[in-house]
Amino acid sequence: MNFSLSKDWCYALTLRYPVDKIKQYGKLFFYEKDNILVCQHFFEFDTTKQELELLSKEIKDGKSIRFSYLNQNKLYNKILSWSKKNNYKVEVIDEWDNPLLIMKDSITMQDYLKNNSHTQVKRNYQKYIKYGNKYKYVFSDSSNRLELWSDVLKIDSDSWKKEENSDMKSLNREDLQYLPFLLKQENNSSLLVVYDEKEKPLAYSLMFKNYDSFWYAVKWGASNNGRENYVGIYCLIKHLEYLNQKEKDLKIDFWGRRNRVYDSLKNDSISRNHIVISNGVE
């Protein structure tokens, strides 16, 4: 199951957005902004004939539909076919090869990182081995998730993202989107926060799981101090090692685009894009 279709994800929309801006068509939810209906579900999912008919009515009434982080797979082809049939305009806003990391039983994460073909990955891993153990790593469990999330927000506000208004609170309270799933889906979410010797939070990594499938790198960040000292890198490596210990056949979707670190870690990829659909009739 796609975690962005889960009830915890969908209910969180009412925490994040004004209620009158949330639109529901069948099982699908959209956020309306500037006459654009922005789909709140990603990757790959199904749509019914009835849902597409409801969206058609909105398009004919002058609204546009945006799908983000859409895999170029079954759903993508269905949307293209539907758009062509109705003479709708499809605009590809962005398109990229999304990095994946797929591990097999025959190799451990440590071996993969140590022997990686990318020089920078090997260098980062050597730094992690040499300096990473000076920090404290705390993983989420049933008792500490809210406390850890509070520290995540501290890290976010003490980073370059805050300075550029791309921290979670500046992005339509993106933090509220993730919190319910983190709190309620213990087996399908994993959060790691890294601290210095004075218990100051420096970096974090948050991952959600598509039930029995890929782990998605939802958010990853470091404070300015943590970034300068490579603690963000140490955090990500530690998280990958931890998940690989839990799952030998680990599958990671880095859910990012044009990220130098993610691209260097991948051993596979999937084509993904953002598209906007509008009425092609002037």
Image (cartoon, rainbow, N blue to C red):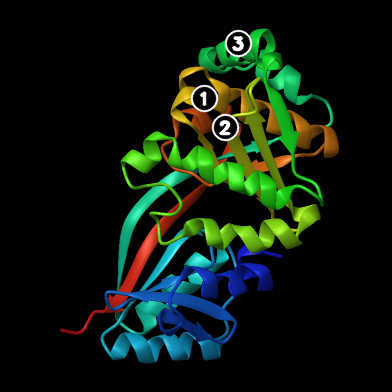
Name the spot of residue 139 as percent of width and height, x first.
75, 38
Q: Check disc 2 and give the amino acid type.
A: Ala
Q: Secondary structure at mark 3?
A: helix
Q: Nearer the viewer, mark 3 or mark 1?
A: 1
Q: Secondary structure at mark 1?
A: helix
Q: How many marks?
A: 3
Name the spot of residue 257 as percent of width and height, x first.
44, 42
User: Is 65 positioned to the left or the right of 132 in the image?
Assistant: left
User: Farthest residue in the front direction?
Assistant: 198
Question: Is tag 2's residue or tag 3's residue first in the polypeptide sequence?
Answer: 3
**Relative to 262, does residue 216 appear above or below in the rendering?**
below
Name the spot of residue 248 as percent of width and height, x first.
83, 35
- Using the image as rendered, state which of residue 148 and residue 35 is in the foreground: 148
Question: Label 3: few (<14), some or many (≥20) within 10 Å?
Answer: some
Q: Check disc 3 and give the amino acid type.
A: Lys
**Residue topped by disc 2:** 203
| Location of residue 5 by image quarter | bottom right
User: Farthest residue in the left direction?
Assistant: 282
Q: State the mark number for residue 52.
A: none
**Residue topped by disc 1:** 226
Q: Are marks 2 and 1 in contact (CB under 8 Å)?
A: yes
Question: Is tag 2's residue or tag 1's residue first in the polypeptide sequence?
Answer: 2
Question: Is tag 3's residue or tag 1's residue first in the polypeptide sequence?
Answer: 3
**How far apart are the two marked residues, 2 and 1, measured between alpha carbons?**
6 Å
Question: Label 1: few (<14), some or many (≥20) within 10 Å?
Answer: many
Q: Check disc 1 and give the amino acid type.
A: Gly
Quadrant of the snapshot with the N terminus = bottom right
**How far apart are the two marked residues, 3 and 1, measured between alpha carbons?**
14 Å
Name the spot of residue 22 as percent of width and height, x first.
46, 80
Question: Label 2: few (<14), some or many (≥20) within 10 Å?
Answer: many
**Residue topped by disc 3:** 127
